[in-house]
Amino acid sequence: MTTASRLPEPYPQGGSNLADILERVLDKGIVIAGDIRINLLDIELLTIKLRLVVASVERAKEMGIDWWEDDPALSSGARRTALARENEDLRHRVEQLERRELTEGGGASGAPRHDSRGEHERDR
Amino acid sequence: MNVTDDLRYVYAVCRPPTAPLHADLTGVAGVPPRQLVHEGLVAVVSPVPERDFAHDALRAHLEDLDWLAATARAHQSVVAALATVTCPLPLRLATVFRDDSGVRAMLEEESERLRRILDRIDGHVEWGVKVWLVGGAPEDPAPGTEPPAARPSRAPESGRDYLRRRRAGNAAREESAARAEVFTRRLHGDLTRYAADARLHPVQSGPLADAGSGRNILNAAYLVPRSRSEEFLELVGRAEGTRPGLRVEVTGPWAAYSFTDGPEAGGVP
């Protein structure tokens, strides 16, 4: 990828950046059926190694690729979901830890132990 | 080279250009492109050898990044040269016909669609605008704001401190992401109102885009009248630098690669 990284930043005038060029010539531009027909989706280099550069949202979804929707690094929606999930997990964990503190330090009454068993069952 | 045995590679379709292309311009196989005129439409073509562009050979070449990069650059350089004299409609990479008559037949069959799009992009260029999140959000709250008990190296025994610390970190990240999103939405909204049309592309990532640029959060294309390009760039320039941690990148002018389909609302990132 030396070609791309050696290019001047941040204003590749006329689009000299390889990622920008590939994005356009491979994924944009009008599709016209020529006499030599090659499905670009069959090209492993394009679909696997360069997928983020070439795959349009619709086409990628057709291919079953929709990583950016679930990947926190790519989708702010997924980021929020991931954070919400993490928050919930953490609250749950804190609850458990505080319960354990109660059981260990709080005394020998049967109630907390019953609670922690209940917790366990809820987890299943 | 026996030209009659070669295939025909088509770069773009346009109206008859007002000026000829540069004589030293070379295409994908190192041969100067020429114009094939058919009923008021021009296909810009060059002969390509069958040994490289017949089905199996072409397929194999496309798996080779060096070949692909060189071909993509050659394709783009012809389209870009054409864009200095007219408003070409660029074709997808590797559109190949057996001979001139195959190209003419295509111009005839696709005439209506080609003319419709050529009318739409006439007098326009495409500008690419990307927003990068650079540096990233703070991973932890500022030092000194947390008690020693909540140091990251310690196991979160009490839970409460752990949660508080994580919440603070999450909040900072959320806030930074939210601010970036607000900026990006506003920028895209402003630019879309200014442009004749807009497209949101998937954000760039992966090995080619990863050149220490940060995280791409907007990757859009705008169809802008040539005469208003300067104002458009000023608009982008004004947005730049108003948000620390965000970098706005402009590419272009491109031929209208992203506007070869039907009209579409710009959408929201």
Image: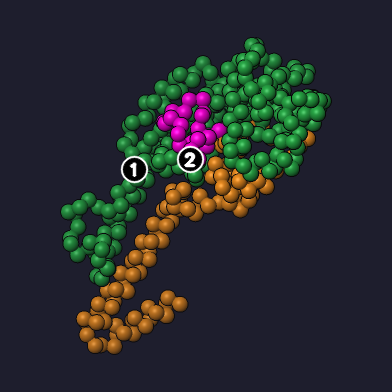
Q: Nearer the viewer, residue A37 or B115?
A: A37
Q: Nearer the viewer, residue A56 or B67?
A: B67
Residue A26 to residue B108: above or below: below
| Labelled disc at residue B56 | none
- Quadrant the N terminus of chain B occupies: top right
Q: Residue at x 27, y 67 (%)?
A: B156
Q: Colour of chain A?
A: orange
Query: Which of the colour schemes (rainbow, by chain, secondary structure, one colour) is used?
Result: by chain
Residue B130 to residue B168: above or below: above
- The amino acid on which the numbered mark 2 sits, given as a three-letter code, is Ala
Q: Using a 10 Å C-alpha cutoff, classify the residue at mark 1 as few (fewer than 14 neighbours), some (14 to 19) or many (20 or more).
A: few
Tell me, yes or no, whether the two marked residues, 1 and 2, touch with CB atoms within 8 Å: no
B152 part of magenta stretch: no
- The residue identified by callout 2 is B209
Image location of residue B33, percent across then percent down: 68, 21
Q: Main secondary structure of the magenta part?
A: loop
Image location of residue B204, percent across then percent down: 49, 41
Q: Which chain is green?
A: B
- Tell me the quarter of the picture where residue B238 sits: top left
- The residue identified by callout 1 is B135
- The amino acid on which the numbered mark 1 sits, given as a three-letter code, is Gly
Q: Nearer the viewer, residue B159 or B130?
A: B130
Q: Nearer the viewer, residue A74 or B194?
A: A74
Please give the range of residues in magenta.
A1-21
Image location of residue B85, percent across then percent down: 61, 15
Image location of residue A28, percent across then percent down: 61, 35
